[in-house]
Amino acid sequence: MNYINDLVTILPEILLAVLILVIITVDLFISRANKWLLTPLTVGGLIVVAAALVVVWDTNESVYAGMYVVDDLSVFFKAATIVIGIISVLFAPAYLVVRRIPLGEFHMILLSALLGMFVLASSSDLITLFLGLELMTMPSYLLTGLHKTDRYSNEGGLKYFLLGSFASAIVLFGISWLYGLTGTTNISEIAASGLEGRMSGALLVALGFLIVGSTFKIAAVPFHYWTPDAYQGAPTPITGFLSVGPKLGAFALLVRVFAEALAPLRADWLGIFLVLTVLTMTIGNVVALTQVNVKRMLAYSSIAHTGYIMVGLAAFANTDDQAVAAQGIESVLFYVLGYAIMNIAAFAVVGMLQRDTRRFGGLNSFAGLGSRSPARAAAMGVLMLSLTGIPPTVGFFAKLYVLLAAVDAGLAWLAVILVLNAAMAAFYYLRVVVYMYMRDPEDEPAPIDTSPFGTVALALSVAGVVILGLFPGAVLSLIEVSAASLF
Amino acid sequence: MLSLIVFTPVVGVLLLLLVPGSNHRAIRWIALGAALASLGFSLALLGYDPAGSEFQFREDLAWIDAFGMRYTLGVDGLSVVLVLLTTLLSVVAMFYSFEPIQTRVKEYYIALLLLMVGMLGVFVSLDLFLFYVFWEISLFPMYVIIGVWGGPRRIYATVKFVLYTLVGSLLMLVAILAVAIAHAASGQPFTFSYEALRGFAYADTLQALAFVAFFLAFAIKVPMWPFHTWLPDAHVEAPTAGSIILAGVMLKLGGYGFLRFSLPLLPDAAVSFAPIVIGLAIVAIIYGGLVAMVQPDLKKLVAYSSVSHMGFVMLGAFVFNEQGLQGAIYQMISHGITTGALFLLVGIIYEQTHDRLIEHMGGLNARVPRYAAMFGLFTFASIGLPGLSGFVGEFLVILGAFRSNGLIAAAAMVVVIISAVYMLWMFQRVFFAVPSDWMRRFWPTLRDINRNEWIALSPLIVLVVVLGVYPGPVLEMIAAPVDRIIEAVNGAGLTGFGPLW
């Protein structure tokens, strides 16, 4: 009986695994001309998985001897994962087909990464956590290098792989120290093992390794050096996925490890976290300012956004008031979701302008887009405003949430640094708008991709960005329930 | 009713999206129609009862419950006059743009209509969060208007404009959150409602810091010296209609912010910081005037005179007495009308010659007499000639300043002379001096004000005279809000929390 029950709680994971197998099989049997069918198939499958998520919502059960937990927090992360998956799958094919990158592999690898994120979000044990992490990042390396004939893609994939596996090893090493100190790998048991106030050299080592490894995964400064190259090398729509998917997973890891297992030690990790947060925001923005390639600019700005999200975690750590701490986690969840939608879409627009394979997403491709393709320019404009954090968009509300959590937790100074950074970011985001509307098109403007999947996905994303910005109420209540499962 | 006023332009935008971009005629009339409808609805606000409750025409809907954000609208006398100013100037700007704007007409009117939504929303919001949302919404259409339809250095100007304002407004956002959180920390429900947050005794340090943040946001918008440097650039590069709205309404957003939020929410800090603000205001008044005097460019001259005039508004607001505050509000309205009209008139010449240098002009009085007459009217209104609207505001502000401190008033008086100097000298050079060689050679034909321009100007002409000779109704309308501000500040005992420096 118990066995069946365990299976039901991991129904979404099972369905996702089945979907991967289905895609592999179907890919074998359809002709090259019909490969596009894989996209609707994947989207349909993901929608079925989403339906399964509705079934397990509100279960809040720990299964498989405490290795795996299906709480609302994990379900929220999984739902966000599905959203990311659907948008990415819709955006990518047009770009990949032009470059003769096989679609079957793409879908299969992407779905595997999603499965890794599922496992990561649900792990209640450091072993499962590490498994999930690897299941998420291995496909990410492959995705980065998916454009086999492109040197930049090769370079990005290799760099990402080398540095990423190094970071994974560091995380694993940290986990092993933590196990040595507490005698358990179970997250809640670690939290209850009375680490508080027992700071020792060994614990410091464990903490240090975990912080270094996990901030590497979210691409926080000073562990961000792999990001720009990996992001620039990867096929553009995949960059969109990489900049949010693995990041979402890594934040799930941060929440599980730091906000759950090591929550009693938060006074100890807060300090270093604050320093990293400020550095991440500021350096990400300063470097992004000087970029003339939109793809690279978005890559650096994603570092800055990592910093904004970390503010939410800092708010969690800086307070003893449970409601305020919950608010910190909630703000992280909302920001990750909102950022995922707007950033994937922004990268996708860059990708749409790379229909000509000799284009690399420079600012010039955007010149005069306002008159060449008003709808796409308007969409990109909304996305840029959202990334800047201007109402009424989800980007604004996400920033507001983080700010609110920070001010509430007594970190008003951090909030001020955040808004100054946001103003700095306005400069380079708005530069795209300047190019689109205030410059004339090039003599030979970049051809624009107008495939139906991409257009639909863009419309959906922009609608999501605006609707979540104006009426975030429904999502907010879900998030509140999700964050509550931590406390 | 208020939602109708604010969101009618959105209906216009939606209609515009359905019209093909090449049909300029339909686009212009739809946009104008939406603006006129909004103006029509806003006339209903004249039914505001000054003796009645503070905020009338209220609307209150739940919005984001999790954070106590509500969609609360309402107007008092101060909002009423500013809403009317906004709808009127928007209509004028749109109508005037019929001829000058020939490229990307559709986008242009969409931007103007969205701008209207943002500005109107600011004036009627009674929820600080909602206010902030509208405040930001009003920023970006102007960014596009300057950046797309502006002059040669438009991109530099518009980016500067946006970055300046954004820094201020984002800091204000943190202050709004801090104020709301402090209010909630005392056990009250978490809310952004203006009426709830007002009149709460915030801690001194919070007040001081929040005041500084609000101050930056509003002072940049006003703009106060030394935060004014974006203004001349923006004005010079903006298309004429953009300048009309920018000077006529957007600067007032800053003044409104001080009167609506800074003073009543943070009275102790306001009192404590008043000497600094008054000092900056006097610098702005004199500095703006002196710099205006030496401007070779007609539009830049008017822009700097705005700095000077808005300094008067700030001075009046921070002397904390009835005359000063009434004068400040009156000056805002009058400045909106006169400066809007002056920019429009400058635009008429510029459209024909694409030149604004004063030294290239001269003797225009003989060539375009009606134009000269109208320019003269608004020049005198701007100087503050009795009988025209500018006089009432300036007079009241100086009166208020005298009641507060004779020296301040004396300093402010100086500028009345300076402003007469730069305006009249400009007028003499443009309209009476011997025509320049340049003009003889390059401007062989100049036409006088045409029918469309007369229509656009006429409401401003009427108002500048009516407001000058019969200020009673407006003063009556703003009397109650002014009393409330004074009450709030007096509640602080006119002592504040002592100097922080």
Image (cartoon, rainbow, N blue to C red):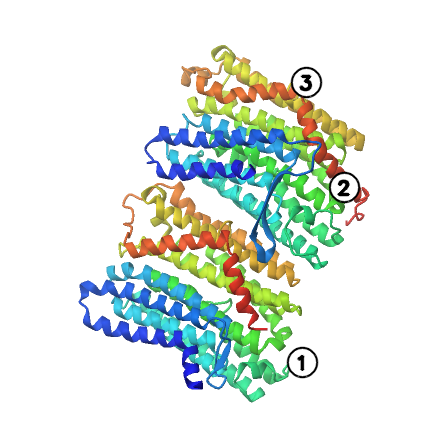
Q: Nearer the viewer, residue B143 or A191?
A: A191
Kindly indicate whether the residue at mark 2 contacts the one at mark 1 (C-beta within 8 angstroms): no
Secondary element at image label 1: loop
Query: In the picture provided, is A368 more to the left or to the right than A56?
Result: left
Residue drawn where x is 34% and y is 71% of the image: A111
Up-down: is B51 above or below B227?
A: above
**A89 lies above or below A465:** below
Residue picked out by circle 1: A197
Instruction: Indicate the position of residue B392 as horizontal and vertical percent values.
Output: 69, 23
- On-image quarter of the C terminus of chain A: bottom right
> Going by the picture, which residue comes out furthest to the front?
A1
The answer to whether residue B112 is left or right of residue B57 is: left
- Give how far across and how far down residue A465 sits, in percent: 45, 54
Q: Which mark is residue B386?
A: 3
User: Residue A190 at what x, y percent from top left?
Assistant: 57, 83
Could you tell me if the residues under marks 3 and 1 are in contact, i.e. CB atoms within 8 Å? no
- Binning the other alpha carbons within 10 Å of mark 1 as few (below 14), some (14 to 19) or many (20 upward) gives few
Residue A486 is drawn in which quadrant? Answer: bottom right
Reading the image, the residue beneath label 2 is B489
Q: Are marks 1 and 2 on the same chain?
A: no
Q: Amino acid at mark 3?
A: Pro
Label 3 resides on the chain identified as B
Toward the top, the furthest residue is B366
Which secondary structure lies at badge 2? helix
Mark 3 residue element: loop
Cα–Cα span, label 2 and label 3: 31 Å
Q: Chain of mark 1?
A: A
In front of the other: label 2 or label 3? 2
Give the side of residue A268 with respect to residue B152, left or right.
right
Residue B318 spot, x, y in % from top left: 73, 37
Looking at the rendered structure, the kind of residue marked 1 is Gly
